[in-house]
Image (cartoon, grey):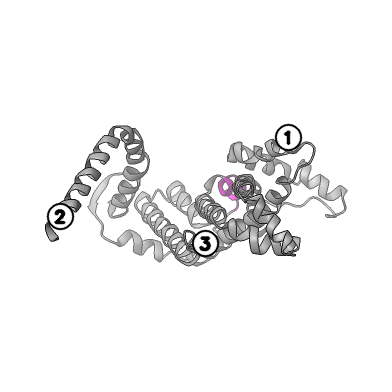
Amino acid sequence: MTAPTTAHRSLRRRARRQSTLQALPWLAPALILIGGVVVYPVGYMIYTSFRDLTRFGTDKGWAGFDNYARVLELEHLPKVAMNTVIWVVGVVMLSIGLGLVLAQFLNKRFPGRKVLRMVIIVPWAASVVMTSTVFVYGLDPFYGIINRALVDLGLLDEPFGFLKSPVPGFLSAMAVAVFVSIPFTTFVFLAGLQAVPHDVLEAAQIDGAGRVQTYWRVVFPMLRGAVVVATIINVINVFNNLPILKTMTGAIPGYDADTTTSLMFKIIQADRQIDTASALSVLNFVVVVVVIGIYLRVVRPMRED
């Protein structure tokens, strides 16, 4: 009995290896691209974080964990870390909430639905730098159209410099980040809503469930996979979203409107400490991986309902 079992396992392993070798030529271009765009940069970033580099990029040798110690000793790191938590949690939660509402609306049949769907995707398809620049000009206290509209509507007594101080500038950047994130989030949820079987909804109505009960007890559980995907993608994008912060709050002195991502850019731009910035980048990478891992562990999107 043992011999046939062993032989069967050997045949299965051989067949698996053969299938892998047959698929390798088709996967090779994607693997090469992943290696060049993802694996190599990450590996080189980790390598650089352990080197002692001068302001001009000269490698002076092994530095151990000195660069990481230098990052943890930054006096403004606690404030920047808190900003990062507020930035990621706030933008992701608002994007998820508004995306759910908007997807529910776009899932209904009404005249002009296709046109509206195309219009909504524009902020996501457009350049983030371009979108941020439009808001920078719109919020300008002297000639900004958004500032003028707020004054004309009576919401402001006079034009306000939103991007001149840390708190208003940071909140304005968060609003733009939500504006940019909503289209992708909405379409992920819209795809999930269209995958909900109509017979399930009809069965819930026959059983006497109202609209609210049907949504939270039938529809929303079926959107778990879409919610997980949207949350993970948004966490990665928002955490690493440098263009919005650089464009809108880059001119604000100090670090009160920075996240760890924009702080990394300032370390490179102002101090030319490439090795320290690499160490901070590695820490950012580890934090994102850990957060996503914990989220997947808690949510367990592949479990059966």
Query: Which range is magenta?
Result: 244-252
Q: Nearer the viewer, mark 1 or mark 2?
A: 2
**Residue 176 in the image: above or below residue 85:** above
Magenta run includes residue 250: yes
Q: Residue 96 carries which label?
A: none
Q: Can residue 256 be seen in this view?
A: no
Q: Quadrant of residue 90?
A: bottom right
Quadrant location of the N terminus? bottom left
Q: What residue type is labelled 1?
A: Val
Q: How far apart are marks 1 and 3 (CA)?
A: 41 Å
Q: Which amino acid does label 2 sit on?
A: Pro
**Residue 221 in the image: above or below residue 269:** below
Q: In this view, does 105 lie to the left or right of 305?
A: right
Instruction: Give the percent coordinates (x, y) of residue 151.
Output: 84, 50
The overriding secondary structure of the stretch rendered in magenta is helix
Q: Residue 115 carries which label?
A: 1
Q: Which residue is drawn at 48% across and 53% down?
A: 261
**Residue 186 in the image: above or below residue 89:** above
Q: Mark 3 points at which residue?
A: 80
Q: Earlier in the sequence, mark 1 or mark 3?
A: 3
